[in-house]
Image (cartoon, helix red, strand yellow):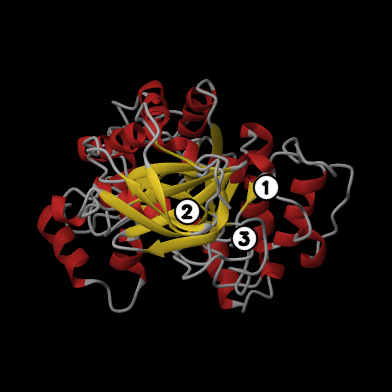
Amino acid sequence: MLKNSAARYTPDWTSLDSRPLPAWYDEAKVGIFIHWGVFSVPGFGSEWFWWHWKGQEPPDPSCVKFMSENYPPGFSYPEFAPQFHAEFFDPEEWADLFKASGAKYVVLTAKHHEGFTNWGSPNSWNWNSVDTGPHRDLVGDLGDAVRNRSLHYGLYNSLFEWFNPLYLTDKKNGFKTQEFVMQKLLPELYNMVVRYRPELIWSDGDWEAPDTYWHSPEFLAWLYNDSPIKDVIVTNDRWGSGCSCKHGGYYNCEDKYTPGQLPDHKWEKCTSVDTRSWGYRRNMKLSELMDLPTIVKDLVATVALGGNYLLNVGPTPDGMIPALFEERLRGLGAWLQVNGEAIYASKPWRIQLENSTIPVWYTSKGSSVYATLTANPPKPSLQLLEPKTSASTKVTLLGFPVPLPWTPLQPGVGLTILLPNLPFTAAQAWTLRLDGVQ
């Protein structure tokens, strides 16, 4: 809950940006992103398939070739929708997997740039998952399962829709008209919030028009002041051209954003197990996926720099999470089960990264400092140069039963730690807890 929930926010960025971020978000650290929609049916290229095939000029030749070789002449993108069956979609199984991954929040695409909604939106007639395809409320069903496991539930929503005639008219008018926003976007957003009460709105597709066109400040003021989720809702920074990394709740800045140093604003790194796409690709190869050590290293660096880590998977059109994605998520969860105390609810320490013989990332919680090694040390002792030691300094390896012997490097600063045989972990990362250091 927010401490100053009695405050009223006005629809301007000075006021909106003054709202404190609900505490649950910073404490959660780890989330799962899900890109799932009609684009999962062709499963070719990426979730931008429709745009690459029919929107951009010239069209992507690989998409044109794929369609001409595999589908009849004149086949249109909306004809993929009835093939989006989701017949194996089991929200309970998904939610069990997300819980096992160690994630604390889940963000599902309610609507991507193609405009298809994964729920029965009254403003998206016949282009939604209840009227066609799965004939099912995917947003609602997954939300129930996720919340039953005490995970926070968020929804991704694209502001723009590539081929919506109302949007295209507004765009042609230089965004001086707002037919799309008034007739489609805002009614749908309000309906989605009241109906599903997400705790996070992951906005996207904002960059073609200013926030005044989208009416973002007005919507956010309502969200923070009067919506049924006003005290818990978290938002990102994609609310209009020029807003990214400047306005909104936490900052995404850009996909796969990786700051070089500690930012002064809460941020999130979103990245995908499949390095080439957010949506499912039928022709993805093992070499194109992030392996578990890379994922864990990425997570550790992100959290040490004060960020949250949102890891994406793209389910198949029949509702399965590919086995390789599942393997990565379960591996992440196994590592977090041992090392999670260095991650969840942690804060950045005064030093984030130390390169002694191997990279060591620091986090802190209460009076404890955590040093996570993202590579196996070349010898059985490890030097840490930054911690200031005292007579009461104690070093433990998370998951290891007894304290580790250590000696000071010089009076009061730095230490040499004698490491045991490090237990095998597929993640190739280990965490030391240092108590009684500064």
Say above or below: 132 vs 61. Answer: above
Q: Which residue is mark 2?
A: 362
Q: Which residue is mark 3?
A: 180
State the separation of the CA atoms marked 2 and 1: 45 Å
Disc 1 residue type? Pro
Say above or below: 196 vs 180. Answer: above
Secondary element type, mark 1: helix
Q: Tell me the quadrant of the picture where the N terminus can be found.
A: top right
Secondary element type, mark 2: strand
Nearer-N-terminus badge (1/3): 3
Say above or below: 308 vs 152. Answer: below
Nearer-N-terminus badge (3/2): 3
How many residues crowd around disc 3 within 10 Å: few (fewer than 14), some, or many (20 or more)?
many
Which residue is rendered at x = 69% and y = 57% of the image? 182
How many residues crowd around disc 1 within 10 Å: few (fewer than 14), some, or many (20 or more)?
some
Which residue is rendered at x = 20% and y = 55% of the image? 378
Q: Position of residue 169 (x, y in %)?
A: 57, 70
Front-most of 345 and 86? 345
Disc 3 residue type? Phe
207 sits left or right of 418 in the view: right
Secondary element type, mark 3: helix
State the separation of the CA atoms marked 3 and 2: 47 Å
Q: Which residue is mark 1?
A: 187
Which residue is rendered at x = 58% and y = 62% of the image? 238
Say above or below: 131 vs 429. Answer: above
Which residue is rendered at x = 75% and y = 51% of the image? 20
How many residues crowd around disc 2 within 10 Å: few (fewer than 14), some, or many (20 or more)?
many
